[in-house]
Amino acid sequence: MAVLNKIRQRSLVLILVIAMALFAFVIGDLFRNSDALAGGNQDVIATINGKDINRTDFQQKVKNYQDRSGGRQTSTQAMNAIYNQELRKILLDTEFEELGLAVEKDEMRDLLKTSFSSYPEFQDENGQFDVNRLNAFIANLKDLNGETAPLGNFLVNYESWANNEQTIASNAVQQSYYNLIKAGIGTTITEAEDDYFGDAKTVDVRYVQIPYTSIADSLVKVSKSDIKEYIKNNEDKFKVDASRELVYVEFKEEASTADEEKIKSDLLALKSDRLEYNDSSKNTDTIPGFDNAIDIEEFVNYYSDIKYSDAFLREAQLPGVAKDSLMKLEVGDYYGPYKDGEYYKLSKLVEVKQLPDSVKVRHILVPYIGGQRADALVTKTPEEAKKTADSILAEITSGRKKFMDLLELSSDKVSNEQDGEIEFAYNAGMAPEFKAYAFDNKVGDVDVVGTSFGYHVIEVLEQKSFNKTYKLATIADKIEPSEQTLQDVFNKMSKFEIAAKDADFNELAKERELTVKPITFKELDENIPGLGSQREIVRWAFEEDTDVNDYKNFPISGFGFVVVKLVEKNEEGLMSVEDASITALPEIRKQKKAQLIREKITASTVNEIASNQGQSPRTAAALTIKNTTLSGAGVEPKVVGAAFGLAEGGTSKPIDGDRGVYVVEVTKINDATKLDNYNAIINRLNNEIRNTVQSKVYKALENAADIEDNRAKTVY
């Protein structure tokens, strides 16, 4: 039903073109990479303070990281994570070597004792840590030659144990390193006093503000040289990594209206029997349709993109788009085809049944080795666990023992505290087999049920809130484009790409009713909004022989195609005047307006200046040096700071603030009483400083390091 074969049948010419393009790509890549021809070293991911990160080892770590993440990380995300790990390790190891920090043998034993003293494998008869048992365990791992041995809930071999020891040692050295730094950091009494008075000392002021908005932007001319000068004086604000700006248009491989109509008609055709010629018997056979299918599950599984479900569905579980119609069906009736997400569906009502919405059961769990959440003490095989559960059931059903008398045999200690009872709703996250037995059987029924946790002896105690439920047989056909539609999309993309050679990209897109989308990215980026990870596009944009105005098509898995055009190359360094002007222009205007405003101020008091400039004097009470908000004006750190530099009754010179030029008069200084003891403040400040040591130290090491990052040229 769904389009299973997406291999496009292109012409021989197209195949030759693709082959030549691939050949050109390989040869071109060799010439672009002079090291490849010259026999240079391509195996260095990065060099940090003279130490190389080897490509082969790096890629193995990336693979292991992806395996551990269960595929939730893209290759780029995994590579970046491992790079950051390796960078951190090299930077810190360099420091440790220079300082002579290491973990000695006796200290390592103490660390292992701290980490593993709670493990029964390493305890004596009195539950105390026994170093001899630890030594014996490690020696045994060596003798196993790579085979695993149980430890707690894990299986370990000598390699994994050694890696864990290295991790423990590394963490201990790091802790010692940071502790040394923290020991050298402290707060003085003067600093504590400053912190205290920063909150306790206040000033009251009168001020006048001449806002920058009092001068129209049109009266202030800003030249390119002004912007260049501003960039030069504020380089940190305008440093940028290398980036590329692209525009692109999309050609989506989506099912057409005709495709959807064909899917719906094919679904309807499945209802009736059909005649089919049998080559073997030379007879025409009648193939039963949905109406007369003997095995409904087999029929659905053969024709549907979603497997048959034998479950009874409550109202809330029915497809929202068809719920009302499905609930009105009689057994044997159909509804559909109807669109539900990315499928068209045809549903047949198979059975209606009254079932409870919640149940109460009690159970005895007999786990087995390898079962979900089975602890290290479990020794039974699945067969032995089943045999034990069957014998418990026999004791209960024969009347020889009561259920409650056998609860001690259950490994579910949580439910045992409730007499083995569990109460749950139909939508609870229980094991499917456990849930099915509880809801599909009657109160009083008891039996053995196997799940991923082990074998349960279950007794149904109570069932509540019976409601109508529905069993549906649904054939789902995924909505996918036909081969003709795929060919049409490919042709449309190809024609656009050819036409773009002699036409304006944006105008051409407009003529063909395509939306041009812009995107800017850095060399190690991978995601394009709406398209996901697209490293090939990023790499193409950063190749040396890709020039501004070059364009190219890229196939996007599960999407279709995009045709991209390189609009601008921005190299590492300072922003261009054009790009920087967005940020610089408003600030330069402020500076020029401030100069014009200061030139107009001739008076020396707040009242006179306010009168001359057509403004009103304002007041602000209880300002603190830590709170830079000026009542009536907003956040103005320069103005508040200047106020604390004045004596009572003093008036400032004009101050260039964030929203205007200010003149401030201090009307009152409210001094605070000195404290007899500043220990509490000192302790608080010490904790605040020491809590930031780790991140700040590492950032300082990274900034000071000599790093040559080749990721974009090697693994990306």
Image (tube, rainbow, N blue to C red):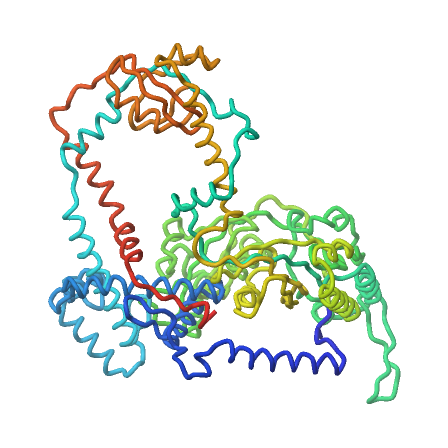
Q: Is residue 162 left or right of residue 107?
A: right
665 w.r.t. 123: above or below? above
Q: Is residue 389 visible?
A: yes
Q: Position of residue 25 (x, y in %)?
A: 58, 78
Task: Compare residues 520 and 347 and report the one nearer the observer.
Answer: 520
524 w.r.t. 591: above or below? below
Task: Compare residues 507 and 531 and report the one nearer the observer.
Answer: 507
Q: Is residue 333 left or right of residue 470?
A: right
234 w.r.t. 392: above or below? above
Q: Quadrant of residue 63?
A: bottom left
Q: Is residue 125 visible?
A: no
Q: Position of residue 552 (x, y in %)?
A: 64, 67
Task: Compare residues 352 and 244 and report the one nearer the observer.
Answer: 244
Position of the N terminus, as image quadrant, is bottom right
Q: Position of residue 420 (x, y in %)?
A: 41, 53
Picture residue at 53% right of the left edge, 69% below the top = 543
Q: Is residue 463 left or right of residue 56?
A: right
Picture residue at 52% right of the left edge, 57% below the top = 521
